[in-house]
Amino acid sequence: MPGTFTMYSTPWCGYCHRLKGQLKREGIDFEEVDIEQVPDAAFIVEQANNGNQTVPTLVFANGTALTNPSLAQIKAELAS
């Protein structure tokens, strides 16, 4: 399922590193965007999180978003 969601993150986010490792171990492909390097990405994250720049925020191809989700939540969203 390559490219089915984008993970918005920062290099210093421990939750982001943990989730990326879990996704890679499961073989789940994703795009990653550093919100500190891409100003428009920070706005996308703020829209999904009531004005907060909370990472990791995942935005799926269908437009839904999950903030700091578990691997099970991601799998469920991908399956729907």
Image (cartoon, grey):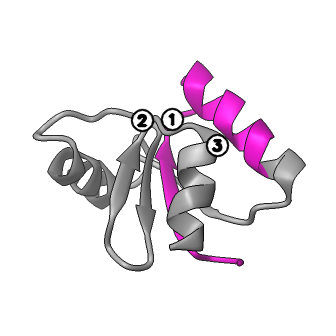
Expressed as whole percent of the image width and height from the top left, the position of residue 63 reads 32, 73
Q: Earlier in the sequence, mark 3 or mark 1?
A: 1
- Distance from the alpha carbon under mark 2 to that under mark 1: 7 Å
Mark 3 element type: helix
Mark 2 element type: loop
- Distance from the alpha carbon under mark 3 to that under mark 1: 19 Å
> From the viewer's perspective, is 19 left or right of 44?
right
> From the viewer's perspective, is 27 left or right of 2?
right
- Distance from the alpha carbon under mark 3 to that under mark 2: 15 Å
The kind of residue tagged 2 is: Val
Q: Is residue 37 above or below residue 53?
A: below
> From the viewer's perspective, is 23 left or right of 66?
right
Residue drawn at the location 84% of the way across and 52% of the way down: 26
Q: Is residue 65 above or below residue 37?
A: below
Residue 40, quarter of picture: bottom left
Q: Which residues are magenta?
A: 1-23
Q: Earlier in the sequence, mark 3 or mark 2?
A: 2
Mark 3, residue position: 71
The reply to whether dot 2 and dot 1 touch (C-beta < 8 Å) is: yes
Mark 1 element type: loop
Q: Earlier in the sequence, mark 2 or mark 1?
A: 1
The kind of residue tagged 3 is: Leu
Which disc number belongs to residue 10?
Answer: 1
**Callout 1 crowding tier (Cα within 10 Å): few <14, some 14–19, many ≥20:** some
Which disc number belongs to residue 23?
Answer: none
Q: Tally the marks.
A: 3
Mark 2, residue position: 55
Residue 28, quarter of picture: bottom right
